[in-house]
Amino acid sequence: MSDCLFCRIVARQHPADIEYEDDAVLAFKDIYPKAPVHILVIPKRHISSIAQLEPGDADLIGRCFVAARSIGEAKGFGEKGYRINVNTGPEGGQVVYHVHFHFTAGRQRGPAA
Ligand code: 5GP
Ligand code: ZN
């Protein structure tokens, strides 16, 4: 069994409130939301960090953004807008080492921290 939390969520070995799924991408609610809507969008295939990306990962990362766009539309934020953040490495605030995109929406905030 993988010791990666998000791989366990993909494998349904750990509970999550799933918002979107296709063959390559999974999205689920962040357990500690920092905005009224806070969803994590992840590639199903394990990539530990943006810092570990390889050229062959480009399509998969693009799929995550297309999925985020679909989530934004489905939740009614297509026009109002939303934010997509990715933390990378220890000084970038990354805690879970499986690439994930924070989709946040539902309130005005200042510039991304
Ligand atoms: P990071 O700091 O690595 O960019 O973000 C990790 C995110 O994962 C945090 O926002 C945190 O709230 C979320 N998280 C941590 N553990 C769990 C969990 O077990 N389930 C879910 N749904 N989110 C989690
Ligand atoms: Zn993983």
Image: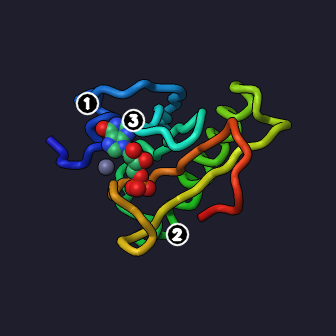
Distance CA(mark 1)–CA(mark 2): 30 Å
- Which residue is depicted at the point 58% across and 56% down? 85
Residue 87 pos. (x, y %): 48, 62
Going by the image, does 70 lie left or right of 30?
right
| Residue 34 appears in view | yes
SS assignment at label 2: helix
Going by the image, does 53 lie left or right of 66?
left
Quadrant in which the C terminus is drawn: bottom right
- Residue type at tag 1: His
Residue 16 pos. (x, y %): 36, 28
- In the depicted view, which residue is nearer to us: 64 or 90? 90
- In the depicted view, which residue is nearer to us: 90 or 34? 34
Instruction: State yes or no: Cβ of the residue under disc 1 lies below 8 Å from any atom of ligand 1.
Output: yes
Foreground mark, 1 or 2, reads: 1
Residue bearing mark 1: 14
Identify the mark at residue 31; answer none if there is no mark: 3
Residue bearing mark 2: 55
Instruction: State yes or no: Cβ of the residue under disc 3 lies below 8 Å from any atom of ligand 1.
Output: yes
Q: Decide which of tag 1 and tag 2 comes sooner along the chain.
A: 1
- In the depicted view, which residue is nearer to us: 57 or 94? 94
Identify whether 4 is placed above or below 57.
above
